Image (tube, grey):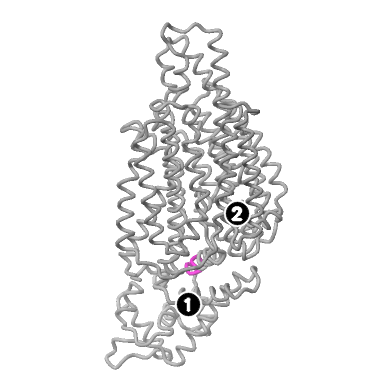
Amino acid sequence: MRQRGLGLIIVALMLGMLLAALDQTIVSTALPRIVSDLGGLEQLSWVVTGYLLASTVSTPLWGKLGDQFGRKRLFLAAIVIFLIGSALCGLSQNMGELILFRSIQGLGGGGLMVLAQAIVGDVVSPRDRGKYQGFFGGVFALSSIVGPLLGGLFVDHLSWHWVFYINLPLGAVALFVIATVLPGDSTRTKHKIDYLGIVLLGGATSCLVLIATWGGTIYPWADPVIIGLGVAAIALLAGWWFAERRAAEPVLPLGLFGLRAFSMSSLVAFVVGFGMFGALIYLPLYLQVVHGVSATLSGVYLLPMMAGMFTMSIVSGQLIARTGKYRFLPIAGSGVATVGLFLLSTLTEHTTLLRLGLFLLVLGVGLGMTMQVLVIIVQNAVHFKDLGVATSGATFFRMIGGSFGVATLGSVFTARLDSDLRALLATTRLPAGFDPARVQQDPTTIQRLPPALVADFLHVYADAIAAVFRVAAPVMFVAFLISWLIPQQRLRQTTKATDLGEVMGATSAERSSLAEVERGLVRLADADLRRGFYHRLGDLAGLTDIPPQGVWIVARLGGEGWVKAADLAERANVSREQGRPYADQLTARGLVERSPDGDSLRLTEAGQRAALRMLRCSSEGLSRLVADWGPNPQLERLVERVASALLGANSDCPRETGQRRAPQGRA
């Protein structure tokens, strides 16, 4: 594939993933304005919960269907579903419609997440895959940081509808590029898709979230509706348990829950999602209603939390890679996050924005120390056959925790606000014609009250939002206690190659176990290529007197016939005159021969033997990186394929200036 075509595909994939990732956070700063327009403050949490549930539960289905029927057509279908949902969200006339259409949007968003990352593996060589994985990790980080800010900008300068409409032109570009440039994938992997398990697990989760949302607010806890939902949830979970025991490819193998590392990490991940999304949803409401800041500024004031998460995710990954120790990070992180939530529980209408920023930074640091590590712990604990599904399962629990967090904390907020308002109205005389119910439906009506009453109503809102964090803080403390039960084990080599997409991304990329190991292997190999790889490889292959530039030429010619010298120079991004001394040295050594016209090169028998030794040395090095997974024919074939691809890639031609790497040539 030519570089230009590959570049267009990567941009389109990143654009699709950006759309799906943004829609998990961009609505947070727009929610107060949406409530003001559509009403339904008690349903506010479901605007986020509907999207999270739909995208999270549908992820495994998208991944398996993409393997079985081709990822290109499934990715196009996901874009279309996402765009239809976006258009309908923008046209919503009431909160019920918006929640329904957000769920449709979430179905498409789940496909965008999982299929974009899978397609990268189809179109990018193993040598370059590590670099592109970094790009996609950046997309997740960018969406988490700028999502609330963009939502505020659209609300302040256009309208909340544009939070959804902006997806249409961007999605149309991605749709056009993928349809015209991405080649169809002919490879198919047959799956026995666990449709029953997906439906039962999704149904049980939805029932539990509804209980958390409606219990004690819309319906009393003893109401037949709540009891019925509880019975349905138990029945669905029991059905799921029986279905998973018989499924050929279960969506979540029951054996994973017998591993203490997986079960404890999943519980902590659930609580982390609970706290993170709860804070993201209700803090913009506090900022816009209590402090009266614009929607844009409310996004700005959330940046300390996002910056803390992003920075500590990177730092924790580096600490793990260098020390091999990880257990202390979720313990410390959940403890710091508990402190952050406790600090937020002290919010009042008089809390300064500087103090709020410090509280959010503490929370972000704690979450950042925890999120990435939980994925690593799970990957390190399971057997190879369960690696892919366990990785997606760890992220699944964090996102389900987010759904529960938004729903549960929404119920806490609504109940506290209703209670405080009743107490205030019982002792306060309101202006004639003022409907107190409007304060719950549209918080902006507070500003139309007499100044003497505004302070009372702002106190009510501040107290209701602080109550959200008074509940979240002890829940996070439970995660702190549970994290002490996570065992420390020897860290596998490929597990050290962390994926920022799994850290910042909200929806798991459902990958096979082999794809998970390959992801880590190519990232480690990519780092190795940047640190004198060809110098070491030449020494190992017996080419001790050949400079790295000459070793690169031997690697490039290995297994090939005649190769034009001009093409070889272009691949190395040097002129023929710059490369000629190295080719001449190889010719003098009897490793390379020139064609009669002097325009082409090929290896001699001695050169081919040297190239074969290099390939063997490269394979042995990669084999050591996957040896801790135990003997496995799949991994052996993976090592052979990656080793060959690395030596045959347009890569890392060392430079005379001491640089180890030449700019990327054409593929």
Of 169 and 321, which appears nearest the observer? 169
Name the element at disc 1. Answer: helix
Q: Is residue 527 magenta?
A: yes
Of residues 624 and 43, the one nearer the viewer is: 43
Horizontal arrangement in the rendering, residue 69 relative to residue 469 (left or right)? left
Q: Which residues are magenta?
A: 526-531
139 shown above or below 25: below
How crowded pointer 1 is (Cα within 10 Å; few <14, some 14-19, many 20+) is rated as many
Residue under label 1, please give it. Answer: 644
Q: Secondary structure at mark 2?
A: helix
Comparing 416 with 90, the one in front is 90
| Residues at marks 1 and 2 touching, judged by CB atoms closer than 8 Å | no
- What is the x, y in percent for residue 478? 68, 39
Identify the residue at horizontal 41%, vertical 87% (top origin).
586
Residue 164 image offset from top left, x and y in percent:
36, 40
Q: Nearer the viewer, residue 266 or 434?
A: 434
Count residues near mark 2 (Cα–Cα under 10 Å), then give few for <14, some for 14-19, many for 20+. Answer: some
Mark 2: amino acid: Leu
The disc label shown at residue 319, or none: 2
**x 59%, y 25%: residue:** 346
Q: Residue furthest left?
A: 597
Viewed as shown, does residue 468 lie left or right of 573?
A: right
**Total numbered labels placed on residues in the image:** 2
Three-letter code for the amino acid on which mark 1 is drawn: Ser
